[in-house]
């Protein structure tokens, strides 16, 4: 049993008196827990196989603990064996193979000192989603979970067939062509220049994980300065140097990570948003042939009111997931939402792993271009 000392604040008020705050030490017994392996693998036919292995952390641990010496194999229902090799970075294992539509896959992970880890999931058969022609008519929507008003317009999604077991996830996105094709990289040599210019050690350590990689957004580098550099003048100098040192290039394809998320609500009996989440609409239903949504983007509404086109693309993501995939996202969103409520009971995120925790689940993704404004 380990003991940790936490600071807690006691503040008392009365009608006539205000008592000063008292800070006291309180010992909390934290029981010893056995570390578990965490497996993360959400797979679809558009991306090569990729899986991440890590360990659960104790309350006093802040750094992620990755597993680098595992044997990872995935077997298809037709007998093909796919070996995932360690990439050398952050517990990530990859293969050059792609999952196939409609196939069931079995995962096996062997790590010295652990029982064999296994799981099974399927990529659902493809159901084409389309959005018929529509007119943008803005209305006010009061979201009951946070009691906030949103400017939205109705949107209908057709499946072209009756889906017997419908499991879908919907999100709205925008894509800015002036920024979405740019990529940024910070070299190790440039990071060393920043360190010599005064970059704190903790910011340097955080930045090392990003060097020599082409990233979608330069904010991935900027936010480290904002989070770890306290002195205002030093922050400005480092920011100026960082922007000088960042390498840039332009790509030709719209990569998923370059899309910006917007707001979307369910407007149908089989759809709902979980807790305070205003981004992800989740639905499970029987014999479904369409989905009614409410689409929102405040920049779009503002610019339409001013009759000022932005040149942005507006998209809808329609994800058809396996049962484990949908249950994972629903429980994950609920767990994150409940963290702000000290009176809520713990929410266990869906896991389908034997002898480990985590998720191994298949899905299909469609990106539907709605319009450009």
Image (cartoon, grey):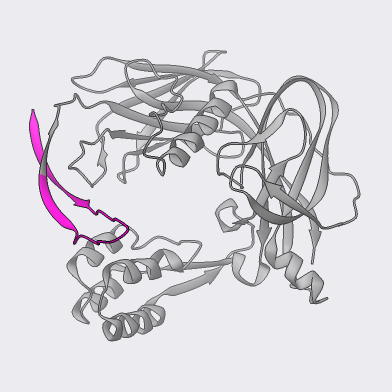
In the rendering, at what x and y percent does residue 193 appear?
25, 78
In the rendering, at what x and y percent does residue 81 appear?
46, 20
Left or right for 108, reference 69: right
Q: Nearer the viewer, residue 282 or 200?
A: 282
Q: Is residue 14 magenta?
A: yes
Q: Residue at x 65, y 21 (%)?
A: 102
Q: Residue at x 21, y 39 (%)?
A: 59
Left or right for 264, reference 332: right
Position of the C terminus by quadrant? bottom right
Q: Residue at x 40, y 23 (%)?
A: 73
Left or right for 226, reference 262: left
Q: Residue at x 33, y 63 (%)?
A: 211
- Tell me where residue 297 sits by quadrant: bottom right
Instruction: Establish if 197 lies above or below 341.
Output: below
Residue 235 can be seen in this image: yes
Instruction: Establish if 290 lies above or below 239.
Output: above
Residue 49 can be seen in this image: no
Instruction: Establish if 22 lies above or below 346.
Output: below
Query: Furthest-front residue in view?
Result: 16
Q: Nearer the viewer, residue 219 or 181?
A: 219
Position of the N terminus by quadrant? top left
In the rendering, at what x and y percent does residue 123 appear?
61, 25
- Tell me where residue 254 sits by quadrant: bottom right
- How many marks the image carries: the answer is 0
Q: Is residue 55 magenta?
A: no
Find the magenta span and give its range.
1-25
């Amino acid at each position: 049993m380990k003991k940790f000392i936490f600071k807690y604040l006691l503040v008392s008020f009365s009608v006539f008196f205000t008592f000063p705050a008292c800070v006291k030490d309180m010992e909390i017994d934290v029981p010893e827990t056995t570390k578990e392996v965490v497996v993360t693998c959400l797979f679809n036919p558009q991306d090569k196989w990729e899986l991440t292995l890590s360990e659960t952390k104790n309350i006093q641990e802040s750094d992620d603990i990755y597993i680098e010496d595992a044997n990872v194999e995935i077997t298809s229902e037709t007998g093909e064996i796919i070996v995932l090799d360690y990439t050398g970075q952050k517990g990530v294992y990859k293969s050059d193979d792609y999952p196939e539509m409609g196939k069931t896959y079995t995962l096996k992970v062997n790590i010295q000192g652990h029982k064999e880890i296994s799981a099974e999931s399927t990529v659902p058969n493809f159901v084409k989603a389309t959005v018929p022609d529509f007119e943008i008519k803005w209305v006010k929507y009061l979201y009951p979970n946070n009691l906030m008003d949103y400017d939205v317009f109705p949107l209908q999604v057709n499946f072209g067939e009756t889906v017997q077991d419908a499991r879908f996830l919907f999100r709205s996105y925008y894509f800015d062509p002036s920024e979405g094709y740019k990529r940024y990289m910070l070299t190790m040599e440039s990071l060393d220049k920043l360190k010599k210019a005064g970059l704190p050690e903790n910011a340097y350590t955080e930045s090392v994980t990003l060097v020599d990689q082409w990233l979608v957004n330069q904010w991935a580098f900027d936010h480290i300065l904002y989070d770890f550099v306290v002195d205002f003048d030093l922050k400005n100098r480092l920011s100026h140097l960082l922007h000088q040192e960042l390498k840039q290039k332009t790509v030709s394809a719209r990569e998923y990570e370059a899309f910006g998320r917007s707001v979307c609500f369910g407007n149908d009996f089989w759809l709902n948003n979980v807790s305070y989440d205003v981004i992800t609409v989740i639905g499970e239903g029987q014999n479904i042939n369409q989905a009614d949504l409410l689409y929102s983007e405040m920049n779009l509404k503002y610019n339409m009111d001013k009759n000022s086109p932005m040149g942005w693309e507006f998209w809808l993501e329609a994800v058809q997931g396996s049962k484990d995939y949908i249950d994972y996202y629903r429980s994950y969103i609920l767990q994150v939402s409940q963290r702000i409520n000290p009176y809520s009971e713990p929410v266990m995120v869906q896991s389908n792993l034997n002898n480990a925790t985590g998720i191994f689940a298949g899905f299909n993704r469609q990106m539907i271009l709605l319009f450009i404004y």
